[in-house]
Image (tube, helix red, strand yellow):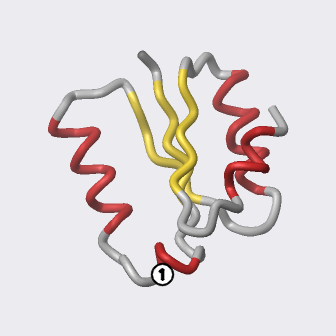
Amino acid sequence: MKTCFIFNPNSGRNRQRPRLAGAIREFIAARSLDAHLATTEGPGHATELARAAVRSGHDLVVAVGGERRGQPEVARL
């Protein structure tokens, strides 16, 4: 299943866990998943990344956030 993990490094909880992005990459690699990690760069970017992932054939988009702000953005799909 082609998967895109969308990660917001600036969310409150994620700032407190700087190793989380690396842990996600390790999770993907250890399981040989057909997946990648996309990192947001500002407000609204999660929506753009999610739409691009769907357009490029991803079956699953996973929002990795710490403040629940990514959920509304990804839900706009």
Q: Residue furthest bottom?
A: 16
Q: What residue do we see at 57% from left, 47% from top?
A: 63
Q: Residue furthest front?
A: 68
Where residue 36 sits: x, y (%)?
Answer: 43, 39
Q: Is residue 34 left or right of residue 72?
A: left
**Residue 17 in the image: above or below residue 53:** below
Where residue 54 sits: x, y (%)?
Answer: 68, 24
Q: What residue do we see at 78% from left, 45% from top?
A: 48
Q: Quadrant of the N terminus?
A: top left
**Residue 12 in the image: above or below residue 6:** below
Q: Mark 1 Cα within 10 Å, few/some/many (few <14, many 20+)?
A: few
Q: Which residue is mark 1?
A: 15
Q: Is residue 36 left or right of residue 74?
A: left
Where residue 44 sits: x, y (%)?
Answer: 82, 58
Q: What residue do we see at 80% from left, 66% from top?
A: 43
In front here: 39 or 59? 59
In front here: 60 or 35? 60
